[in-house]
Amino acid sequence: MSSSIYHYTYIITNTTNQMKYIGVRSCSCLSENDSDYMGSSKSLDEAMNETPEAFTKSIIDTFPTREIANSNEQWLHETYDVARNSEFFN
């Protein structure tokens, strides 16, 4: 029996202030079943600890390889300039 690895990009949104986080993930479960994983950002974790109910996670897209998923995440980061955009936790 082989185990599949699934790769996807996602966005987490704070429904209170609309701040967002864009990330990439690989896991052994289908992306839609990976709701427990909510990113790896320290600032996102701190905000989620205060009001976890205010955050939602949406799958942006799924990919056959991690490399393609990483490329998509990089494109999204560049497109939204997440490093300097105050609307993002990234």
Image (spheres, rainbow, N blue to C red):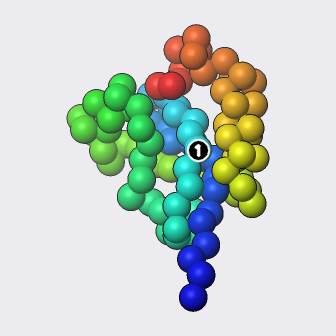
Which residue appears at 44% of the width and 42% of the height? 39
Q: Is residue 88 above or below residue 38?
A: above
Quadrant assignment, res 6: bottom right
Q: Residue furthest bottom?
A: 1
> In x, y percent, where is residue 21?
52, 33
Q: Is residue 78 above or below residue 9?
A: above
Which residue appears at 71% of the width and 46% of the height? 67
Q: Is residue 1 left or right of residue 54?
A: right
User: Which quarter of the image is occupied by the N terminus?
Assistant: bottom right
Visible residue check, residue 32: no
Q: Is residue 36 above or below residue 53?
A: below
Visible residue check, residue 68: yes
Which residue appears at 63% of the width and 47% of the height? 9
Instruction: Kindly identify the amino acid type of the residue bearing the numbered disc 1.
Output: Val
Q: Secondary structure at mark 1?
A: strand
> In x, y percent, where is residue 71?
74, 38
Quadrant assignment, res 51: top left
> In x, y percent, where is residue 85?
59, 15
> In x, y percent, where is residue 58?
57, 51
Q: Residue furthest left?
A: 50
Q: Is residue 48 left or right of residue 38?
A: left
Q: Alpha-carbon neighbours of circle 1 within 10 Å: few (<14), some, or many (≥20)?
A: many
Q: Residue furthest front?
A: 1
Q: Is residue 54 above or below residue 75?
A: below
Q: Is residue 46 left or right of residue 90?
A: left
Which residue appears at 61% of the width and 72% of the height? 4
Q: Which residue is mark 1?
A: 24
Quadrant assignment, res 3: bottom right
How many marks do you count on the picture? Answer: 1
